[in-house]
Image (cartoon, rainbow, N blue to C red):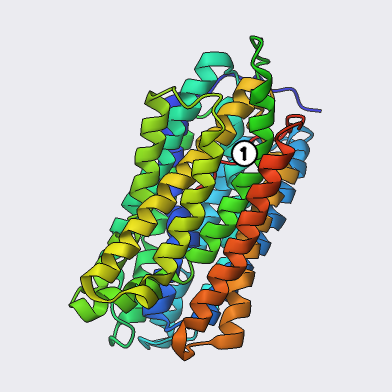
Amino acid sequence: MISRPKTQTPLAAVLAFSFLNSIATGIGTSGIYFLTAQGYHFSDRQNYLLGVVLGVTYILGAKGAGPLLRSLARSRRTSRGVLAAMMVLMGGLCVVPSITIALAGDDQPPAWPIWLMAVAYSPLTGILWPMVESYLSGGRSGPALRAAVGSWNLVWSGALVLAFWGIAPFVQFAGAPDAARQAAGALALLVVVHAAGIGVLFRFAPEPAPHAEDAHEPHPAVYSRLLSAFRLLLPTSYMVSSALSPFLPKAIENLAAPLGIGSAWFPVLASAWLLPRWLGFLMLERWQGWHGRWAMPIVGGLLVVAGFAGSFLASRIATGWPGLALQLGGLAAFGFGMATIYCGAIYYALEVGKAQVEAGGTHEALIGVGYTLGPICGLAAASAFGNSEGGRFEWAVVGSVGGLAVLSAAIALVRGAGAVASDAPPHPGSG
């Protein structure tokens, strides 16, 4: 085995690298639905199928992250070198759609480059973020680790807001002559973001510093029970999020387009849940009064489910500006609920002492199951009902996803009464 010195990587470098990659992976795995819907004329069914592919391949990548890091310890390759290679590969995948258009000389190329990118890009994100987490947590413990994680949450979640605003100029109404070229161009720009990430890696240590064991103070017994509840709510919230994302471009278009709002505003409107999530992270980091309170998982779960239902069904409940207001209000509630669940999950993991923010393959795979199950529900509804009248598709998705989420929340709260704390960390990720 090759012995390498392991020094702590500066927090500023980890935050900068996370900021850049959160922009890129946010567009490549969440914002991509706006680009496929407007640029490649993807139907609801196709976007949900894309979501299933992203979820399954993410699981494969996340499960491979742990073995990859262990193999690095037995080889001459460094973690920093692997991250640099991933930046090159991920950046190269982002230009595949544009290269296809250039070679074909056609503004409406086949969709296979998008599928190729999804199949290859998503598992790389499943490997990327656990490796970044290992640099974030390496050599830090106690208050220093909690402060670093709090700053990290604000950075990666804020980057996602900017990512959605950034793709806005590239989103055009489906049917515009160069809509596909614009969509591919937005993806191609990500090569610049990944290249900048390589530059930041020069500040990284070759390997993450060893995890610093934290000498934990005694904590109330309720913290372990709350951790158990939040650990089940977290993948549930990702399931709800992944059920919403593929349909969000169409949901917003249904209400915004009749009001004369241009398609460039659709991603900006979609950030109505990303910005409240960022604000939720900020508020919950500054205000500590929620610690130890069962109201947090209850309120967080209710906000996620109610916000999801309101934003998804808005066009079936109201039209015009009232409908759009309902949709944006639902997205805001959903975003704040997501922040509540995530903050609770990571806080109690850190406090209870099971907070090694590393490549825990089982947990990341569980998050991947959430990523996959949501689009599966949407795909089933889209296949059964399509664009049928009466909103049967929307009601089917809300009923199936909402039902599973409520069931999961009930189990989480019941099990929390006597649960033993999980040993896996919450997954910050980029979505």
Residue that extends furthest to the left in the rendered view of this protein: 260
Q: Secondary structure at mark 1?
A: helix
Residue nearest the viewer, comparing 327 with 295 = 295
Residue nearest the viewer, comparing 337 with 274 = 337
- In x, y percent, where is residue 7? 58, 18
Residue drawn where x is 28% and y is 87% of the image = 177
Residue drawn where x is 52% and y is 24% of the image = 291
In this orientation, does residue 120 appear?
no
User: With 108 as the anchor, is 113 left or right in this view?
Assistant: right
Q: Amino acid at mark 1?
A: Phe
User: With 183 as the anchor, is 82 left or right in this view?
Assistant: right
Asked where in the image residue 135 lies, by quadrant, the reply is: top right
Asked where in the image residue 368 lies, by quadrant, the reply is: bottom right
Q: Which residue is mark 1?
A: 230
- In x, y percent, where is residue 125? 58, 52
- In x, y percent, where is residue 150? 45, 28
